[in-house]
Image (spheres, grey):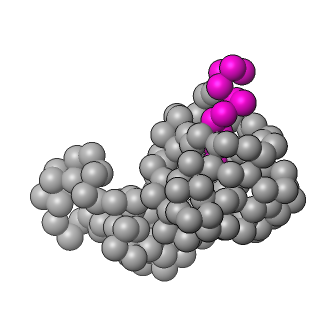
Amino acid sequence: MSGRSLATAPYIDVLKSLGARVRLYDESAGELLDVAALTRELPHGSTVYHCGPAGLMAAVEEATAGWDTDKVRSESFGGDVPVDGTTLGDPFEVELAYSGGKVVQVGSDETMLRALLREKAPVDYSCEAGECGTCILDYRNGSVEHRDTVLEDDERGEMMTPCVSRARGRIVIDL
């Protein structure tokens, strides 16, 4: 099991009670799941069940390429989440109003959320698909290309979802 933070993961005590049969990876502690290495360790004929963000799903599909299709099972919970390396749009800048005007550069191949997290900005998030509303941020000015399914039209003039939405040029947010 891999999660952003095992401190808040559901059923963690149950998973821990299963002992060596379950491996836990805590992203907040710098522990990253190596999908390719993990699948190489599996006994021949194993079945892999997976779900999660698009990047994880793509990594599992790549690591199991060539397997019998009935041995790789997946479930997707929502919209498309960008896979690393995908061009998402033009680069832009995010000015953090409450952080002394710090400016974060968002590349064409990364989401605003990932750029903010890279710079240690305190942003809550969950689905990374613009569907849950956990990462919604207020913005003061700038032009936003909304790509979410959670905000109402009347909210889009002052709020955005940094997990999928993009800005044009520079945007100022309340962080």
Where, by quadrant of the figure, is residue 116 drawn? Answer: bottom right
Residue lying furthest front: 100
Residue lying furthest left: 17
- The structure residue drawn at horizontal position 44% and vertical position 62%, both measured from the top left corner, is 46
* Magenta span of residues: 152-162
- The structure residue drawn at horizontal position 28% and vertical position 59%, both measured from the top left corner, is 6
**Can residue 160 be found in the magenta stretch?**
yes
Q: Does residue 43 appear anywhere in the picture?
A: no
Q: Position of residue 142 (x, y in %)?
A: 78, 46
Lateral position of residue 76 relative to residue 47, left or right: right
Q: Position of residue 23 (x, y in %)?
A: 30, 68
- The structure residue drawn at horizontal position 78% and vertical position 56%, both measured from the top left corner, is 170
Residue situated in front as seen by the camera: 22 or 158: 158
Q: Position of residue 172 (x, y in %)?
A: 68, 51
Report the number of numbered marks.
Answer: 0
Residue situated in front as seen by the camera: 12 or 158: 158
Lateral position of residue 154 relative to residue 170, left or right: left
- The structure residue drawn at horizontal position 58% and vertical position 34%, both measured from the top left corner, is 131
Q: Is residue 30 above or below residue 50?
A: below
Q: Does residue 145 appear anywhere in the picture?
A: yes
Lateral position of residue 44 relative to residue 147, left or right: left
Lateral position of residue 91 relative to residue 150, left or right: right
**Can residue 169 be found in the magenta stretch?**
no
Q: Quadrant of the N terminus?
A: bottom left
Q: Position of residue 39 (x, y in %)?
A: 48, 71
Residue situated in front as seen by the camera: 131 or 156: 156
